[in-house]
Each structure stands twice: as structure tokens, then as C-alpha cells.
Image (spheres, rainbow, N blue to C red):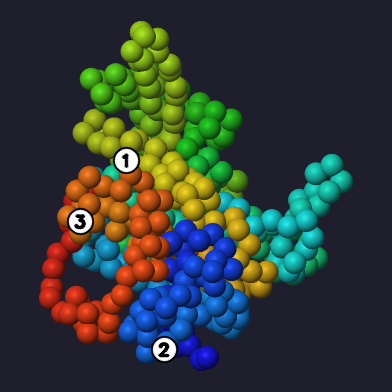
Amino acid sequence: MVYPFAAVAFAGVLMFLCRLQARRQVGWLLRNRPSMEKFGALFGVYGVPHGDTLNHAFCGVEPGEVQEVVCMMTETLIRRKVLYGSRLMERYYVVAGDGTGTVSYSERHCPHCLTRTHNGKTQYYHNVLELKVVTPEGFVFSLMSEFIENEAENVSKQDCETKAFYRLARRLKERFPRLPISLSLDGLFARGPTFGLCEDLGWKYMIVLKDNDLPSVHEEFDALVELQSENRRTVHTGKDGAVEQQYRWVDDIAYVDSQGRQHIVSVVECIETRRAKDGTSTVSKHKWITNHKVSKTHVAALANEGGRLRWKIENEGFNVQKNGGYGLEHAYTKNPTSAKVFYFLLQIAHMLSQLVNNGSLLRKIFPAGLGSAKNLALRLLEAWRNGRISRADIEQIARPRFQIRFRFDTS
């Protein structure tokens, strides 16, 4: 049977939405009569593509075209102001950047594999760098991705996260030239080339500053912060104000990188004390380097809604996609091109799942909720396998205009 590509792509997204975690599960769980009827109503073909059909079709697809669908979906949310109320200082969309592993093998499976050797054993693996829009309320939407991979099998120096970031940043600026961005990055990027790139692109940044990074910046901060007693603020957050955050900062620190380029930066330090019910307390220190101008009115927002929001890409992003049923680290295929397409379809499914799980339509039908996002996937699978819907039903559902509000309602 010949399937339109839309039907094949939809089957791939549905596989991730239902958390099937393997291509072969498409054949076992999605190819029953009610499912075939729905594919007929949607795509005019009575049948559901087999998992092997998905893999075969995706081998001939340009991954960049599927990446563009992800970009368009996130762009739509931005343009329709779904994320408007979550902007940092009512202007900047916080974009967290981080890399993660996708698959690994004991033998080389393509010329682009990264390699590492431990105890005499070589591992072949693939990584990806993500730039995701993150919000304090918990939304994590892929904005653009860059695969970290070698150009050929025998290279003198492997690809890495920083190289991928410089490539990805240029692509992102070209795709979203006017988007006001504040990057939230880990200490790997606390370096001159990153500062210079952000300055060239007109982006703001909040980057983790570790104790052993940029000694000259630390020295100047330590020397000036004691003289600027006005640059202090204490904030109490958490339940009953159990978390105390003491901020200190210094603006206009001059840093000259290894290439002789000067950057004017600020440093923000936060000493956080968390008090438990038993009277004990834990103290932690956080420090960021930034090109934001810092003031008492927004230093806490810069730290909590800018710098620390980076953790959302790991927790609500990669962790959910790896351990929440999406199977990010599962080898859906050994074909490099098809693997990239599957990755982008996973990002689409994760975005849709977040929107459905936090939308007013779901709360209207299930006022008490479903308990977890995994339960939502289970209900969706049951409804898809057993529910019957015609083309006329679909047209009737799509005809009236309606508004969806979100649990966080940032619009």
C-alpha cells in the first residue's frame, strides 16, 4: 500500500505520543480496525503504516525539513503570545542550551559516530545539542537542534558541544532574526567566543560561572563587590519564606579573552539558605556571568527566571524524554538520516503532549486530572485504538472556533 507522507509522519508522532517506545509496537498496537478507519478519514487511505515503513520512508527525507516543522510550531506559540507572560523582564524569551546523548553502540554503525575509549573498550555514540524555550511554569519547547557528529570516520579532532553551539547559534539567528533571546547556559560556555558571538547576534546571556573559570573576572568581582554595598538584595521565597537568597553583583567588569577581544560583563552571586522543618539548613552558592545590566529590581528575576531556569531543559526536557516513555535513547533505526527524523518527531510529540496536558480542554473533560503525563498517553492510546470517528465528525469538530487556555495561562 502507498501512503502519503503526512500519514507516515503522523504515525511516527502518534508512536511517541502514546509512548510506545519502539517502532515494532506500531504494528502491534496501532494497526487495528478503528485505527485504520481513522487513518482513512484523515488521509484517505485505509491502513496504518508499519514501523518498518516509517523507517524506510524517513531514510529518504531531508531532516532539515522536519526540523522546520518544529521551528514553525514553537514560532506559532510565540506569535500567538502563549509564552508572552513568561518572558524574562517582560521582554526576553529564555532559551536554555544543553547537549545530551541519544544512542550508543559497541560497534561503529555509521561514519559520523563519536567515539570514546575506556578500559580498552571503544564506545560509539551520538549526541545532540538543543536550544529550547523554557518557562518558569514548566513548558520546555524545542526551538532548534544541532547534531554533534564527526564529518568522517577518521578525523583528527572530534565534533563537540561548543562547536555545535557556534553552528546552531548562527542558524537560530538566521531563522529567528528578531526574537529577543536570553540564553541560559552552563559553565562550559563561560568563555570569550561565546560572549563575542552573543554580542554579535544581539543576544543576552546568563552563564554559570564556576570557581575555577575566568580567574581575572573572579578577582575583579571580589575586589569591587566589597566596595559596592548598594549592590545587595535579600529575597525570601518558597513556602513560608523558608528559602533565603542573598544577592551581590558587580556591573561593568572588563574581560579580555585569549583573542584580545574585550567584553564588558556583570557577575551575579547568590547565597541560598534553605531551612527545613526540623530546623536544619543547607547553604549553596550560585554564580553567573551575564551581559544583562543588573539592578535591585530584577536581580532575583535574572537569577531564578534566567540563570537557574537552565535546569528545566534537563529535568522537564531530556529527563522526561529519556525516562518518561518517549524512549529518547532507544535506537529506533540505525540509518543516520532516519534517526534524525525520528528525533524531530519526538520533539513534536513532546510539545503536543505538554500543550494537551496543560490545556483547558483536558481539564474540562477530566477536572481531577489524569494523575500523570504517562496516564494521558495511556488514555490516548486506548481512545485511538477503540474510538471510532468519521471524516464528517472530524470536519464538524474542526469547524467552530474556540480558545484553549493553559494551566499557567501566560497569554
The percent coordinates of residue 349 (x first, y second) are 41, 63
Find the distance from the CA under tag 2 to the CA under tag 3. Answer: 31 Å
Q: Secondary structure at mark 3?
A: helix
| C-alpha distance separating marks 1 and 3 | 32 Å
Crowd tier of the residue under label 2, counting other residues whose Cα lies within 10 Å: few below 14, some 14–19, many 20 or above: some
| Residue at the image point whose x is 47% and y is 80% from the top | 48
Q: Which residue is mark 1?
A: 305
Q: Earlier in the sequence, mark 1 or mark 2?
A: 2
Q: With respect to residue 65, does 129 lie above or below?
A: above
Q: Quadrant of residue 389?
A: bottom left
What SS does tag 1 mark? helix
- Say if mark 1 contacts mark 2, CB within 8 Å: no
- The amino acid type, in three-letter code, at marker 2 is Val
Q: Residue at x 59, y 55 (%)?
A: 329
**Label placed on residue 365:** 3
- Residue 69's x, y, as percent? 40, 73
- Mark 3: which amino acid? Ile
Left or right position of 335 against 32: right
Q: Earlier in the sequence, mark 2 or mark 3?
A: 2
Q: Badge 2 is on which residue? A: 45
| Near-viewer residue (150 or 260) | 150
Going by the image, does 253 lie left or right of 147? left
* Residue that protrudes farthest toward the right in the picture: 120
Q: Position of residue 27 (x, y in %)?
A: 54, 72
- Near mark 3 (Cα within 10 A), the count class, few <14, some 14-19 or many ≥20, is few
